[in-house]
Image (cartoon, helix red, strand yellow):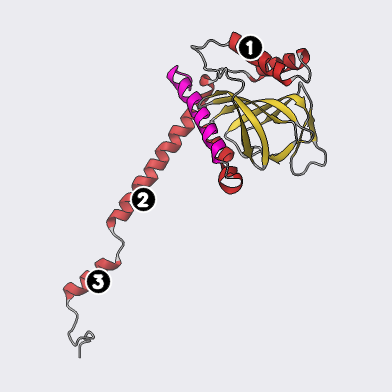
């Protein structure tokens, strides 16, 4: 005796085929997965190629900036306004406006909260592969360095910076004229225990670093005025550099 459905009718072959088809995942889902896979593979390869040639877009040199910082510290020890003017004057005399865009407005300071540390910064230059800022606070601060897609060079101008990596039992100490190099991907705790300022230079991929600078706004400070100022000035400088061919 054949089995019957709940309504008393035996299931037909057509209805069984329809039920099996409904149970199978739609073909479109596999198509989207294949497309996503190849798109991801394509952009991964493009990223590897660009990462291998990004050096050709650098304008600044870490050693030259270190020398400028040391000269500024030696000429105007402890005098931050004079140090800032000295650094900008040197850079603007060294680099042509057709080569790189620099922000001449040294009064354009804004707060910066990132990794739990707080200070203020003056953005001298921002492009896709480089940024140059003066960062610091006279009050002291401490935080997480962040995990970055760029090498970072922290040239101490005033005060001291202390740094620490897990497994070390001694702090690293950087004084005026010293440079603290944080390689791409390396993580540290850092502290400017009694206040200080530094010329900070990053070279690598700058846009992926921006979320680190924005996160504290959304999850802690809610200082959206500063977020807007940071976004506006960074975007203005990056676009200005792109317009003259500086990536």
Disc 3 element: helix
Mark 1 surroundings within 10 Å by alpha-carbon count, few (fewer than 14), some (14 through 19), many (20 or more): few
Q: Which residues are magenta?
A: 224-247
Q: Foreground residue, 229 or 86?
A: 229
Residue 174 location, x and y as percent? 78, 28
Image quadrant occupied by the N terminus: bottom left
Spot occupied by residue 162 in the image (x, y as percentages of width and height): 77, 34
Q: Is residue 29 magenta?
A: no
Q: Magenta stretch mostly in which secondary structure? A: helix
Q: CA distance from mark 2 to mark 1?
A: 54 Å
The residue pinned by badge 3 equals: 19
Query: Is 241 a magenta residue?
Result: yes
Q: Nearer the viewer, residue 185 or 214?
A: 214
User: Is residue 152 visible in this depiction of the protein?
Assistant: yes
Dot 3 crowding, Cα within 10 Å, few <14, some 14–19, many 20+: few
**x, y percent for residue 21:** 25, 66
Residue indicated by mark 1: 89
Is residue 230 left or right of 190 when viewed as pictured? left
| Residue labelled with disc 2 | 33
Q: Residue at x 75, y 34 (%)?
A: 139
Q: Is residue 71 above or below residue 166?
A: above
Q: Nearer the viewer, residue 29 or 103?
A: 103
Q: Residue at x 57, y 45 (%)?
A: 222
């Amino acid at each position: 005796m054949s089995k019957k459905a709940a309504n008393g009718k035996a299931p037909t072959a057509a209805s069984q085929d329809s039920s099996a088809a409904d149970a199978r995942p739609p073909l479109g889902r596999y198509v989207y997965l294949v497309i996503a896979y190849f798109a991801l593979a394509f952009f991964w390869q493009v990223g590897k190629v660009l990462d291998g040639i990004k050096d050709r877009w650098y304008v600044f040199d870490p050693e030259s900036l270190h020398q400028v910082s040391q000269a500024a510290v030696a000429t105007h020890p402890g005098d931050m306004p004079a140090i800032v003017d000295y650094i900008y004057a040197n850079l603007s005399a060294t680099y042509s406006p057709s080569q790189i865009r620099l922000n001449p407005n040294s009064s354009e300071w804004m707060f910066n909260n990132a990794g739990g540390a707080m200070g203020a910064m003056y953005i001298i230059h921002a492009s896709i592969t480089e940024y140059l800022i003066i960062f610091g606070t006279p009050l002291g601060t401490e935080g997480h360095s962040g995990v970055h897609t760029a090498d970072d060079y922290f040239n101490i101008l005033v005060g001291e910076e202390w740094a620490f990596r897990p497994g070390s039992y001694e702090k690293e100490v950087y004084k005026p004229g010293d440079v603290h190099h944080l390689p791409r991907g390396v993580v540290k705790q850092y502290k400017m225990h009694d206040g200080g300022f530094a010329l900070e230079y990053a070279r690598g991929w700058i846009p992926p670093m921006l979320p680190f600078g924005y996160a504290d706004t959304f999850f802690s400070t809610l200082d959206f005025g500063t977020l807007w100022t940071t976004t506006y000035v960074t975007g203005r400088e990056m676009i200005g550099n792109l317009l003259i061919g500086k990536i």
